[in-house]
Image (tube, helix red, strand yellow):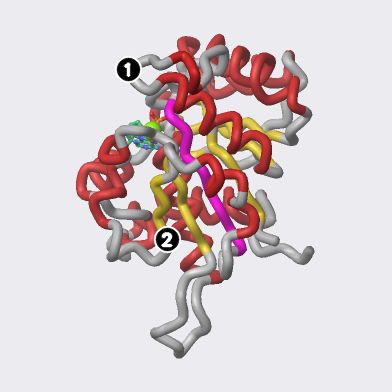
């Protein structure tokens, strides 16, 4: 059985898609295919349940990425089997922020909000873990709290908050305040903080993942945060 993680926060722009695709990329980099066997297929899948599949920037490079990409917003049966995809050991599910779980697929809403809620519920039923990215902007605090209290904790799914997009040049005041907020809520917080680097924003425009960054010092530092996060999540760890 594979390990299926969801990346979730109802706030947009906190880095859900960035983290999903880059965790898939570093996992595939370390654990993908047998070395020396170019035909080996990747044991890693990144899944999107956004009905506008093209809204996910990395979807443009479907056949070039070193992991599988699954667009599954309308495949409830497929979503329920996510941990059991043949040959797949690691599944990362990107979720769009706007889904309202009070809707359901029978509402006939023409924008597909009900179907999106059904898809998200199916994902929450099967993932073993949820990663909750947030930023150091106070605007991300309340949506993060809503996501955890209303969606994740009632289902009893283990989760970890990860702070993303912190710019060390801004000093540590915002970072400390964010950590304090997480601590006050008694949420588990990742030790890894994903720093802000221009290359991440540029890479998402170009459809690149961290494993494809050039080997210069800054790009390596930027990339390092995602390897650290994967290590902290015990990706590939003994089970
Ligand atoms: N650590 C980071 N450093 C620089 N830019 C980032 C970082 N994380 C996310 N971004 C950028 O912020 C924007 C929003 O990120 P995204 O992953 O799309 O958020 P979400 O999926 O939560 O809406 C994107 O342009 C992305 O490239
Ligand atoms: Mg996104």
- Which residue is most to the left? 206
Within the image, what quadrant is residue 153 found in?
top right
Percent position of residue 160, x then y: 67, 34
Which segment is the magenta one?
89-96
Instruction: Tell me if 88 is positioned left or right of 164 in this view.
Output: right
Res 136 seen here: no
Label 2 or label 1, whichever lies nearer to me, is: 1
The magenta stretch spans residue 60:
no
- Which residue is most to the bottom? 36
Picture quarter with ligand 1: top left
Give the dominant element type of the magenta stretch: helix, strand or loop: strand
Measured in 3D between alpha carbons, the distance from the residue under mark 2 to the one under mark 1, in whole angstroms, is 30 Å
At mark 2, the secondary structure is strand
Name the residue tied to disc 1.
Answer: 110
Res 188 seen here: yes
Against 229, residue 87 (above or below) is: below
- Residue drawn at the location 74% of the way across and 33% of the way down: 157
Which mark, residue 70?
none
- Residue drawn at the location 67% of the way across and 42% of the way down: 126
Against 33, residue 222 (above or below) is: above
Q: Nearer the viewer, residue 195 or 128?
A: 128
- Ligand 2: does it lie within 8 Å of the C-beta at label 2? no
At mark 1, the secondary structure is loop
Name the residue tied to disc 2.
Answer: 68
Percent position of residue 121, x then y: 60, 29
CB atoms of marks 2 and 1 within 8 Å: no
- Residue drawn at the location 43% of the way across and 38% of the way down: 74
Q: Nearer the viewer, residue 111 or 236?
A: 111
Percent position of residue 166, x then y: 45, 30
Lower sequence index among marks 2 and 1? 2
């Amino acid at each position: 059985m594979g390990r299926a993680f969801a990346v979730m926060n109802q706030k947009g722009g906190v880095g859900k898609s960035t983290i999903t695709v880059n965790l898939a990329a570093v996992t595939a980099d370390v654990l993908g295919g047998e070395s020396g066997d170019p035909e080996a297929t990747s044991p890693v899948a990144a899944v999107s349940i956004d009905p506008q599949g093209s809204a996910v920037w990395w979807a443009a490079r479907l056949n070039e990425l070193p992991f599988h990409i699954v667009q599954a917003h309308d495949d409830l049966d497929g979503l329920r089997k996510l941990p059991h995809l043949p040959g797949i050991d690691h599944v990362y599910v990107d979720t769009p922020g706007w889904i309202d779980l009070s809707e359901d697929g029978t509402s006939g809403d023409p924008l597909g909000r009900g179907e999106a809620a059904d898809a998200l519920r199916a994902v929450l039923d099967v993932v073993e873990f949820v990663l909750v990215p947030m930023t150091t902007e106070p605007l991300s605090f309340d949506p993060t709290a809503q996501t955890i209290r209303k969606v994740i904790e009632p289902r009893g799914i283990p989760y970890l908050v990860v702070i993303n997009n912190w710019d060390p040049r801004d000093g540590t005041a915002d970072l400390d305040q964010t950590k304090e907020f997480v601590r006050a809520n008694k949420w588990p917080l990742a030790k890894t903080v994903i720093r802000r680097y221009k290359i991440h924003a540029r890479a998402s425009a170009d459809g690149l993942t961290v494993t494809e960054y050039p080997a210069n010092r800054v790009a390596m530092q930027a990339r390092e945060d995602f390897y650290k996060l994967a290590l902290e999540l015990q990706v590939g760890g003994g089970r």
